[in-house]
Every structure is written in structure tokens, then in C-alpha cells.
Amino acid sequence: MKFAILGDIHHYFDNWDVNFFNQSDYEFLIFTGDLPDFFHFRRKIYKILGKIQKKSFLIWGNHDGFSFLEVLGEIFRIELFKIREKDFNVIQKRLDQIQEQLGENFIIGGYHIHQITSDLAIFMVRPHSIGGNEISYKDYLYKKYNVTDLESSYLKMKQLLDDFLQKNQITSLIFLGHNGPYGISKHPYDLWGCDFNPNLGDFGDKDYQKILEYARSLNLQIPLVIGGHMHHQLSKNIKNVPKKTRISIQKIENTYYVNPAKVPRITKHSRYYVSVTLKENQIKEVKEIFLKKF
């Protein structure tokens, strides 16, 4: 089995990419979310992605479904811009419209498990994550998912996994989050370390960490854990660090952790994604791809 992982798109995906991946030997694609550009000006990205003919998995990012001001309000806790209950139907309408444009090849959302083979599934964890010690878009997640904090998010995922395993006999899980799990990032340049404020340390999601621990307690194999959000390029304000870009792939015991959030993924010189080869639910190869000819 061979598939491709693409990090936070932020509109850097075009018709060349569509043709490349449609003609490739990848069985499916995985996206970590954040489809619009930073200021949310460009809307054609959804129609372009809708041309993909491969099965694709997409977890909603913190930019997906929200306006630029709403994202700022959540990140910087600006009450004037934060979403209110009256905005929930508008946000859901936006997400429904995006899903319609992306089409039936996309499996989208969060808090969802999808079976890939008879013994392998992909677990899409909490959507719209911003990272850190608090849950993002708290009121919206409560309205849609009945989640109020990191603990209730974990309990929701635990129940989801228990229910899934009652009906499906799988041995392995791939995990997909917009952000990555807490517990493996000590430094700002680590997979999900906080570079814009090193004092915050590990910026991974603690509910993501707990569901991984629970899955392992059930003797499930976890060959791959995916999360984006923390872009590869480190903050220019950070000093005295040995690396200028973030670690993107790390193997810990039998699990590969991948952060594919290279932004922008398209430059004058290359196009970026991560290629994964899986055999008998074991990782045979994980490598960063920089396409030079396009």
C-alpha cells in the first residue's frame, strides 16, 4: 500500500498537482487541513481539490470553516471577533459547501474512524485544533460534538474507538490530526514544539496523546501518527536554536510521527509532500518528496 500525505495546504495546490496525483500510483491521499490561504481571499482551492479522483482523507484545520477574523479571535482571544452561538449555522453551512465542492472522493471531518482494509483503519481525531493546553473553538465543538474540554474530547474518542472495535476486527490504526499529539516535542524545532513562544514548550494536543495511549493499551498497532498545524519554517523571532526548520519525521519505537506542514509547499524550485509505503501494516518507507520538475 502506498499513499501520499499533504500538510496544511493554505491554497498551495493547483491543477498540476491534480494531474500528478490522479496519474500516480498512490492509493489514497491524506490532508491535515487548513485549505484556504492565510487571509481567506482565494476560494478556488476547493474546486481544484474537487478534481482529485483518488480517495482522500481530510481533517478540518483551525482555518477551515471560519473567517480570517474568527481565526484571529480564537488565536488571540479577541472577544469582538470570536464566534457566537448565532454564528454556528453559518459555519456549518460553510463546511457543508466546502464538502460539496470537494466531492464524494473526500472523507472529511473529525471524530471519525474509517476502515481502509480488513485489519487497518484511519482515526481522524479532534478537528479544528489550534494546539496548546486548551480546546479551540470550545462553544462550537460543544454544539456540534458535545465536547467541552480536552478530557471530554478524549472520552468521546475512547467511546468512538470502543464502539468501532465491537463491530470491526482490526489490528492497526493510522491516526490523523490537524495538530499532533502532546508528549514527544521538547524543543521549538521538534515536530510540535512551540517556536513562536518557546516558553509554551510542547504544543501538541493532550487528548490526542491520551487516545494513542489507550489504543496501545488495547494492543493495537500504530504504524503512523500524522499532524500538521506547526509549520516547518520556525518563527524569525526565535534565537539560539540549532535548527532553522522543524523536524518533520521521527520514529519512536514502532511508530512513525509525521508533520507534513511545509508552508508554502509550492515554491519556484519544488513541490512538497510525504510518501508512505505500508506492507502488512508495517511502515516500509516514509520519505519527504521535493518534486523538481513540474
Image (spheres, rainbow, N blue to C red):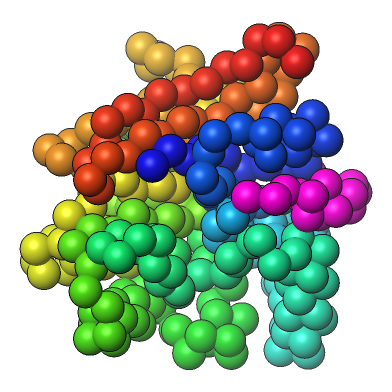
Using the rendered view, name the quadrant where residue 108 is placed: bottom right
Q: Main secondary structure of the magenta part?
A: loop
Range drawn in magenta: 36-54
Residue at 83% from the left image edge and 35% from the top image edge: 15
Q: Does the magenta stretch include residue 44?
A: yes
Relative to 218, is 19 on the left or the right? Answer: right
Relative to 253, is 269 on the left or the right? Answer: right
Q: In this view, does 57 lie above or below 203?
A: below
Residue at 30% from the left image edge and 60% from the top image edge: 120
Q: How many labels does the image show?
A: 0
Q: Is residue 78 above or below residue 230?
A: below
- The residue closer to the viewer here, 63 or 198, is 63
Image coordinates for residue 185, horizontal then vertical, percent: 29, 39
- The residue closer to the viewer here, 74 or 22, is 22
Image coordinates for residue 12, horizontal then vertical, percent: 75, 35
Q: In this view, does 141 lie above or below 204?
A: below
Q: Is residue 69 above or below residue 260?
A: below
Q: Can residue 25 be seen in this view?
A: yes
Residue at 23% from the left image edge and 58% from the top image edge: 172
Using the rendered view, name the quadrant where residue 101 is placed: bottom right
Image coordinates for residue 39, horizontal then vertical, percent: 83, 47
Q: Can residue 261 be seen in this view?
A: no
